[in-house]
Image: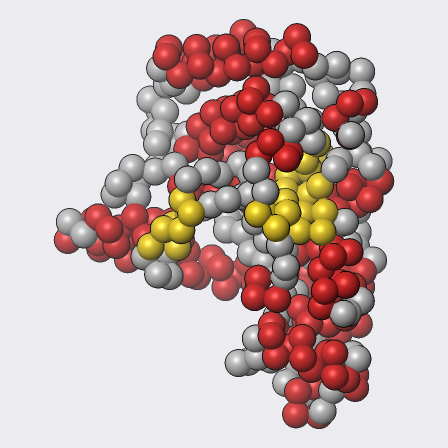
């Protein structure tokens, strides 16, 4: 999937714990690659919303996020990452993708109009929506990740489904994503806001909010809400997912009350059921029996420091910035063992 990221809106009912980066020391995190790259594109921009570019005019904001934020977490906290990339979208997701494309086109026009007026605050707000993560950007990111010694895994469908599977298999400690979809896919642990720092811009409100790492444990979520994972999926279907339109006007808190009262979607009053136009069982299967790549390989290896430095120079990075990245990589390399996960899974 290229373009913008999405996700089910479960935030109001999901209990979470604010944690420190020290808590994540030496942990292996399976990241939703497109989600992370999209966030870098959103945040790393000039005041007028224009992304940073290389001498040839190609965008580099996503590369800046990868090489600076990720190497800092690796060098300061010994964290290890696996970047999981989306595979072909499920057919049911195509309608959502088309809707996002139209939103992006509308935001791009509004961004350009704001620039003409000299309204940079509005311009920045619209630019964060108008941006698009292209196939070329994604492929370039994979090159950078491999130069950094970071494993890349290709998902069968959704990256969050693949990442959740990898955590259950023991190849990562947690899924790293801003969205909650991985919980629906059965991720035992979800960590949010680890590759971004400072503040997050909220385009809909035109304001920023502080970003702090959040820990969400699926077992704790289900226990506190007094529901099963299957019921959590039903709640998501009621409010809408990337694969179906929900019941208009129904939020997560009301959906939770309904599912706790009636048990499942089939037992809901007809007034709710008839407003769902999707095949409920098919959407359930997407989350409860997701398509995953079972033949993936996770191979951590020593970074190609010289190769990465040359790559960054060609892309227009200053010697000062290149030196910063090189020093971080050299600092962490002697402490790592590349034969397997070993200590990183503790």
Tell me what residue is drawn at x 71 percent, y 41 percent.
Answer: 174
Kindly tell me whether residue 153 is visible in this rendering.
yes
**Which residue is nearer to you in this view: 158 or 346?**
346
The number of numbered badges drawn on the structure is: 0
Where on the picture, by quarter, is residue 265? bottom right
Q: Where is residue 323 in the image (x, y as percent from the top left)?
A: 43, 10
Kindly tell me whether residue 87 is visible in this rendering.
no
Q: Where is residue 278 in the image (x, y as percent from the top left)?
A: 69, 76
Residue at the extreme bottom: 270
Tell me what residue is drawn at x 41 percent, y 40 percent.
Answer: 198
Q: Position of residue 178 (x, y in %)?
A: 56, 49
**Which residue is nearer to you in this view: 289 or 216?**
216
Quarter of the figure that contains the C terminus: top right
Q: Where is residue 134 in the image (x, y as percent from the top left)?
A: 50, 41
Q: Height in image: 1 above or below 262?
A: above
**Which residue is nearer to you in this view: 24 or 103?**
24
Q: Height in image: 7 above or below 314?
A: below
Tell me what residue is drawn at x 74 percent, y 26 percent.
Answer: 344
Q: Height in image: 137 above or below 248?
A: above
Tell me what residue is drawn at x 73 percent, y 78 percent.
Answer: 259
Where on the picture, by quarter, is residue 170? top right
Q: Height in image: 214 above or below 98?
A: above
User: Tell me, what colour scheme is on the image?
Assistant: secondary structure
Residue at the extreme left: 117
Where on the picture, by quarter, is residue 339? top right
């Amino acid at each position: 999937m290229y373009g913008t990221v999405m996700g089910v809106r479960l935030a109001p009912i999901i209990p979470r714990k604010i944690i420190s980066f020290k808590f994540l020391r030496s942990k292996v995190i399976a990241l939703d690659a497109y989600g992370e790259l999209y966030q870098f594109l959103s945040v790393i921009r000039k005041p007028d919303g224009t992304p940073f570019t290389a001498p040839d005019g190609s965008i580099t904001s996503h590369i800046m996020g990868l090489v600076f934020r990720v190497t800092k977490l690796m060098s300061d906290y010994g964290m290890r990452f696996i970047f999981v990339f989306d595979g072909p979208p499920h057919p049911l997701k195509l309608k959502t993708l088309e809707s996002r494309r139209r939103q992006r086109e509308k935001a791009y026009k509004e961004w350009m109009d704001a620039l003409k007026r000299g309204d940079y605050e509005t311009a920045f707000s619209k630019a964060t929506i108008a941006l698009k993560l292209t196939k070329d950007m994604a492929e370039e990111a994979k090159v950078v990740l491999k130069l950094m010694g970071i494993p890349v895994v290709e998902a069968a469908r959704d990256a969050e489904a693949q990442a959740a599977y990898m955590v259950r298999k023991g190849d990562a400690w947690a899924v790293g994503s801003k969205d909650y979809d991985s919980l629906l896919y059965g991720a035992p642990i979800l960590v949010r806001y680890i590759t971004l720092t400072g503040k997050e811009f909220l385009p809909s409100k035109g304001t920023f909010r502080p970003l702090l790492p959040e820990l969400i444990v699926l077992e704790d979520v289900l226990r506190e809400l007094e529901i099963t994972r299957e019921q959590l999926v039903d709640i998501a279907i009621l409010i809408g997912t990337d694969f179906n339109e929900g019941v208009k006007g129904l939020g997560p808190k009301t959906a939770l009350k309904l599912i706790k009262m009636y048990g499942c979607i089939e037992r809901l009053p007809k007034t709710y059921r008839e407003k769902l136009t999707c095949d409920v069982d098919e959407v359930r299967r997407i989350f409860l029996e997701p398509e995953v790549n079972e033949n993936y390989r996770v191979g951590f290896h020593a970074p190609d420091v010289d190769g990465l430095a040359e790559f960054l120079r060609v892309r227009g990075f200053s010697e000062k910035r290149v030196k910063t990245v090189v020093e971080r990589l050299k600092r962490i390399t002697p402490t790592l063992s590349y034969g397997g996960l070993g200590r990183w899974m503790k």
